[in-house]
Image (cartoon, rainbow, N blue to C red):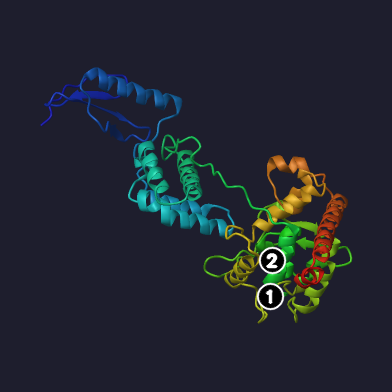
Amino acid sequence: MAKKKSAKRRFGAVRQYRSGRWTASYLDPTGVRRRAEETFATAADAEIWLSQVEADLTRGDWRDPDAGAVPFGEYALKWVEERDIVPTTEELYRRLLRLHILPTFEVYDLDEITPPRVREWRTGRRSVTGATTVAKSYRLLKAILETATDDELIRRNPCRIKGAGKESATEREIATVEQVDALAAAVGLRWRLMVYLGAYGPMRPEEQAELRRRDVDLDNMTIRVRKAAPELSTGKRAVGDTKSAAGKRHVVLPDFLQRDLSRHLDWYAEKGKGEEGLLFVGEKGAPFRRSSFGRRWRRARSLVGMPETFRFYDLRHTGHTLSTRSGATLKDTMVRAGQSSEKAAMIYQHSDLERQKEVASGLDKMVRTAREKAADVAESTPSGAQVVRDA
């Protein structure tokens, strides 16, 4: 049994055990007696610990020692549920948690996740998966624990690795005008307009999925992007807002697309629903599926000889680059692509519809010139038969 040696203090109390070690305790703001989790070699060490606790209480920095005794897995899943995020982002967060974060941290309470454990986890992840996935997982873990810090469940966020959440993305590949035309031809008549809108819109696939007849203005060559319908891994289309507020926009198309746009409306757009008919549907009239279109895209990419790393989404980067080459400024291309940030909003907020028409006109001229040049080269190149006759 411990030998008691009490010392009267203005705050808290210390006493010595028979082993010679010292302990310290105090009454918290609710009247509950709290005892130090560790013992001390000397009475002075116990007094210092009590002084630190007293200082925290005086400054308002005191934290309930049991506050962090919350299972991380439970807190993380609740954190996702409480976020006001789009379905695709929620799906991403849950996948990162399930595959990369919870297998390590689910067994710990919030206050048991320490900087060394975070570093060890990140090192292990980097050895088995890509750097981009590790960076996304680290950012998610840090965001969850930052909220736990704000909730005063932990004193400080243990995610303190500088630069760990940054992604060093590789340079996106750019297609030429000829390659875009070849991809549009190879993917088939029903889907060629999707390729052109991806490159010369430039529209996101999920934005194209929710385009309707009423969004198309053939006279002015504009398409209005109102919503987006990304496809989740379950196959369900999550119809909702665009990726950002800037995503809701009027896109002025170059005039060379007028024939393709008009023909698509007549031949392939959803029929029977009037102006509400979807612009892109499959052969059986149902909304196009990412999986079925993906097969067509990969086959077209192979036929054209494009590298496997060139994704449909990279058509947007192609559109950015071609617009810039045609004379568009950064603010013009960002408005055109529906990109938004607080800083960017101040830069491109004055890029109006007339300026967008100028950009589309420049793009139209550039593509027409490239096509004419390619046609001239083809005509001026002698055929094999001609070479034989000349010989």
Kind of residue sitting beneath label 2: Leu
Q: Quadrant of residue 120?
A: top left
Between marks 2 and 1 in the image, the one whose residue lies nearer the viewer: 2
| Residue marked by disc 1 | 281
Cβ–Cβ below 8 Å for labels 2 and 1?
A: no
Which residue appears farthest toward the top when viewing the image?
A: 44
Q: Earlier in the sequence, mark 2 or mark 1?
A: 2
Question: As rendered, which of 66 and 175 lies closer to the eye?
Answer: 175
Give percent across and percent down for residue 294: 59, 68
The answer to whether residue 103 is visible is: yes
Residue 193 rendering spot, x and y as whole percentages: 74, 68
Q: Secondary structure at mark 1?
A: loop
Q: Quadrant of residue 385?
A: bottom right
Neighbourhood count class around disc 1 (C-alpha, 10 Å): few under 14, some 14–19, many 20 upward: some
Q: CA distance from mark 2 to mark 1?
A: 19 Å
Determine which quarter of the picture holds residue 159.
top left
| Residue 32 higher or lower than 187, as above or below | above
Residue lying at 45% horizontally and 25% vertically, measured from the top left: 59
**Residue at disc 2, secondary structure:** helix
* Above or below, comparing residue 259 to residue 369 in the picture: below
Where does the image place residue 378, in percent across and percent down from the top left?
Answer: 80, 65
Q: Residue at x 82, y 44 (%)?
A: 350
| On-image quarter of the N terminus | top left
Nearer-the-camera pick, 38 or 93 = 93
Q: 341 left or right of 94?
A: right
